[in-house]
Amino acid sequence: MDNSRRNFIKTSAGAAAAPLLLPLGLSAQDASPKPLRMGFIGMGKQNRGLLRNFMSHGTHVVSVCDVDQTRLKDAKAGVDEQNAKKGLNIECVATTKYEDIIARDDIDAVCIATPDHWHAIPTVAALRSGKDVYCEKPLTHNIFEAVTVIDEVKKNGRVLQTGSMQRSSKEFRVACELVRNGVIGEIERVECSFGDPGRPCDLPEEQMEPGLDWERWLGPAPKRPYNSILSPRGLHNNFPRWRNYREFGGGMVTDWGAHHLDIAQWGLGMDGSGPVEVIPPEDPEANRGCTLKYANGVTVTHGGGIGVEFHGSKGVVQVSRGKFALTIDGEEKYRALSKEDKSVTSQYTLAEREFLETAEIKLYKSVGHVPDFLQAVANRTKPITDEVVGGGSAICCHLMNIGYYFNANVKWNPETNEFADGTGDPAWLTRDYRAPYSFG
């Protein structure tokens, strides 16, 4: 790891926060700020949905970016059509280079939903240019990037929301409040269910149609031949499988794991901290069984169960999307885990009413993930999955992958984000960035 990256990691924890800045068009006296002007980077399936969501909340989209001409033209046409329907005279500029969006002084915020290996570089550039950022999960491709992003948010006084939208869903908040308020006793362990870790990319070369800037798609990742699995052509309505490969993502550990490990962190009250040890599975070939251990002895293990399961001395809380169950002293009090059960809304609502009416710990109630970000931008406050939350959850994912990739039992210092007790290799915290793609 070069000196600049090492210094980023060592100095991030103590960096002082800069004064918060109001977004463009907003003054302290202005009770009706101008609509937020945004640029969108990476126009695949996820960002097309986010774009529609943001526009439905009154955001003005003034630029879209993608390295694929088909996706780019479609995104621009969609924005232009919506603006015309609303009678808005707004020009949406299409570009293949995110730098064009970063350079614009009239853009307040960006939404980034590129492949994971392209999350951190435009995020940092946007923060340094004075823009707020909504970036998809996992927030970064590696631990060095997570620390860098956290540092840059503080330095530049910006607002950042990570797309870990499960925290904006009520079943997850209620589940975590039950855990945090001791309803199931002392927490002993957490089990998280998601798929395999990343693997090295070994896809064969395919002939590429015109219209994709493959060099820019690869960016900081190693040079390799094109394969349509990584970047399907056209307006595909699926999530491409680049995420399965270590060069571009981190497998399901950083995909669904970024959701479920985030909820584990929330339920354990570990935002701003994290595990102190990574324990790999006994079988070095296994794709399940890696464990994160916290200073209080609680473990979070990959594999088994549904979604996220908190096991306590008095009971169990189970939660996933559209699923919720609470068991206390062996009695299943509330259950919505299958179609045959009662509705999930009724079950978590009744659990909340019975156990949390007078609870001491009340967690952040989000109005919805996108509006929560917009509200934070307007008020210059922290959104529900800010840089510390998103960065910390990404670090948990990356630590778990380190356990799989290197079959390594390592000790970790969550305060300094460094390996501890002589374990681990600093090179595992980062990657080699292919020139000229870097943080500058």
Image (cartoon, grey):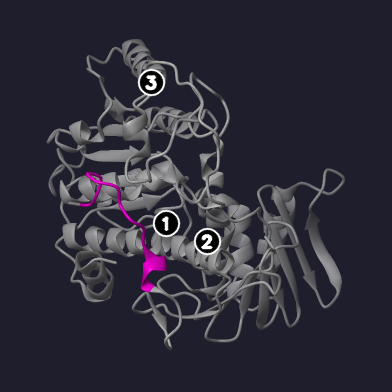
Query: Can residue 33 be found in the magenta stretch?
Result: no
User: Which residue does the image show at 67% across and 76% down from the upper left?
Assistant: 189
Give the residue drawn at x 13%, y 45%.
Answer: 27
Q: Amino acid at mark 3?
A: Ala
Contact between marks 1 and 2 (CB within 8 A): the answer is yes
Q: In the rendered view, tell whether residue 63 sits above or below residue 351.
A: above
Q: Is residue 357 visible?
A: no
Residue 191, by quadrant, is bottom right
Residue labelled with disc 2: 262
Give the labeled residue for mark 3. Answer: 75
Q: Residues within 10 Å of mark 3 (few under 14, many from 20)?
A: many
What amino acid is found at the position of numbered circle 2 in the picture?
Asp
Pointer 1: what residue? Answer: 385
Q: Earlier in the sequence, mark 3 or mark 1?
A: 3
Q: How many marks?
A: 3
- Tell me, yes or no, if residue 73 can be seen here: yes
- The amino acid type found where label 1 is placed reads Thr
Mark 3 and mark 2: Cα distance apart in space: 30 Å
Q: What is the C-alpha distance between the residues marked 3 and 1?
A: 26 Å
Q: Which residues are magenta?
A: 426-439
Secondary structure, magenta segment, majority class: loop
> Judging from the image, what secondary structure is the residue with disc 1 in?
loop
Can you tell which quarter of the image residue 386 is in? bottom left
- Crowd tier of the residue under label 1, counting other residues whose Cα lies within 10 Å: few below 14, some 14–19, many 20 or above: many
Front residue (pair 49, 433): 433
* Mark 2 Cα-neighbour bin, 10 Å: few <14, some 14–19, many ≥20: many
Q: Give the label, 3 or 1, closer to the camera.
A: 3
Residue 263 picture location, percent across and down: 56, 62
